[in-house]
Amino acid sequence: MSLKGRHLIDPNDFSLEELDEIYDLADRVIENKDAFSDICKGKILGTLFYEPSTRTRLSFESAMLRLGGTVLGFSDANTSSVAKGESIADTIRVLSTYADIAVMRHPKEGAPRLAAEYSLIPVINGGDGGHQHPTQTLTDLLTIRRYKGTLENHTIAFCGDLMFGRTVHSLISVMARYKGSCFELISPSELRLPEHLRFSLTEKHDVCFHETENLEEVIGRVDVLYMTRIQKERFFNEADYMRLKDSYILDRNKLKNAREDLIVMHPLPRVNEIGYDVDDDERAVYFRQAEYGIYVRMALIALLLGVNANVESK
């Protein structure tokens, strides 16, 4: 089984066994980071970020640098030839001659898949509109596995923007493939999970899920609480955003009714949906989750490049 030369556009592009290979390597990186410090020496990561990003872009850069490679690219499309009207197809064709692997963040759904069709190097989707965010999903799955020991038989609550939240869409679509998954979907009626995803859960995966607008109603019976922000950039009407933005705020008081072994996750950035008084609770794992994003991306880059990751401890 080899991931060398593959693209990662949708998290379901990989089998569960292939995903396990990524998590297993990420675990090895976490346990001995220095052993992997030069396995990508001489390799170049190209970053094509057509949309603002902090964690995704910097964690990819950190991942490649920690592997001994280098990085080139842009974090603002207006500073590239895109501003002159260059197509995605031509941009990736040229980048394929400059770099060994690429990551793309784009506001339009499907843009990374289009890039992959014209690319000579592996392309990683760093987030496309409200569609998918597969490397955040890898981060989330690694976090759950490390804290819970398995990815099976969990009840996961998703709270906030389920309509536009690409991190939610990606994670639900993969977790539905694991045995015993059950979902609590908490959102205002305007931001419910899209119909096609709800249909997939029932018709394709036969997964149990329950929809509610009340966080307190379900917090006592979930293993994982995945909080998300209401995303201002996805709204066409600011009045709608202002009306919904404070729909859910998790604080220490709400956690009193939660399980002791609950983990609270968030893809970040947060606005005010998690109070700062939650940060010191041992169940809050979102900053460790962000850290794990570096290591899972290190594993992914190494596997897609096909470099030798069978290194000995230094």
Image: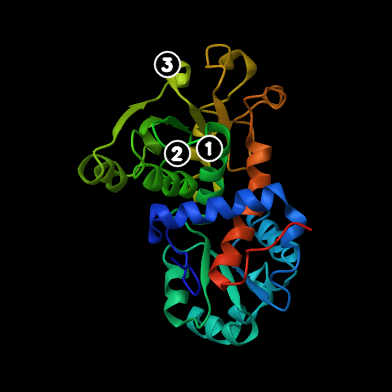
Pointer 1 residue: 144
For the C terminus, which image quadrant?
bottom right
Q: As displayed, is residue 196 above or below residue 216?
A: below
The span from disc 1 to disc 3 (Cα, nearest Å) is 23 Å
Residue 90 can be seen in this image: yes
Give the class, few, some or many, for how many residues have Cα within 10 Å of label 3's Cα (few <14, many ≥20). Answer: few
In percent of width and height, residue 8 lies at 47, 64
In percent of width and height, residue 168 lies at 45, 43
In this rendered view, identify the residue nearer to me: 256 or 108: 256
Which mark sits nearer the N-terminus, 1 or 3?
1
Q: Residue at x 55, y 66 (%)?
A: 303
What kind of element bears circle 3?
helix
Q: As displayed, is residue 157 above or below residue 26?
A: above
For the N terminus, which image quadrant?
bottom left
In percent of width and height, residue 137 lies at 50, 49
Q: Is residue 281 left or right of residue 117?
A: right
Q: Residue at x 40, y 38 (%)?
A: 191
What kind of element bears circle 1?
helix
In this rendered view, identify the residue nearer to me: 77 or 170: 170
What kind of element bears circle 2?
loop
Q: Mark 3 belongs to which amino acid? A: Glu
Q: Mark 2 belongs to which amino acid? A: Leu
Which mark sits nearer the N-terminus, 1 or 2?
1
The span from disc 3 to disc 2 (Cα, nearest Å) is 24 Å
